[in-house]
Image (tube, rainbow, N blue to C red):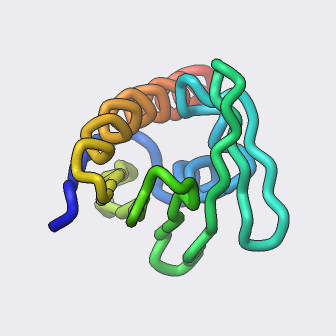
Amino acid sequence: MYGTVRHEIRIQRPAADVWALAGDAERLCEWFPGIVSSAVDGTLRTIVTASGIPMPEEIMACDNTQRRFQYRLTMPVFKHHRGTIDVIDLHDDTTLVVYSTEADPRAMALVIGGGTAGALRELKRQMELTTEGAL
């Protein structure tokens, strides 16, 4: 049985705008606190944490139609990991973003889930700040 955590947030911005940032694998470090860089080479992404730890990932899906980004951490500490970011158009110039994590060992889902909650708050802050600045 995997540990699972899911967080969601509503952003006052069209889905296409949110997806432009959240769906770009190389831009994760712009909105995920504690990640200082991310580099993509084909389907491989390496993120580096603020403590200098590189974390290799495999990009499993980046679907521009469904606005879904899926990846898995490939570190030996995980028997299984899958992260999913869904950007859902609510058709009123707002967007629901859902960030799900499943992991084995189960406790790692809670660790990562804490980070994903903060990432969604930062994504919302940036997206809505940009909207206010454009007015």
User: In the displayed structure, would residue 109 be above or below residue 67?
Assistant: above
- The residue that appears at 72% across and 50% down in the rendered structure is 46
- The residue that appears at 29% across and 53% down in the rendered structure is 105
- The residue that appears at 62% across and 58% down in the rendered structure is 57
Spot occupied by residue 125 in the image (x, y as percentages of width and height): 46, 24
Q: How many numbered marks, from 0 up? A: 0
- The residue that appears at 37% across and 40% down in the rendered structure is 112
Towards the viewer: 8 or 36: 36
Extreme residue in the left direction: 1
Query: Can residue 102 be seen from the camera position used here?
Result: yes
Spot occupied by residue 15 in the image (x, y as percentages of width and height): 47, 57
Question: Looking at the rendering, which quadrant does residue 60 occupy?
Answer: bottom right
The quadrant of the rendering that contains the C terminus is: top right
Towards the viewer: 47 or 30: 47
Extreme residue in the front direction: 76
Question: Looking at the rendering, which quadrant does residue 116 occupy?
Answer: top left
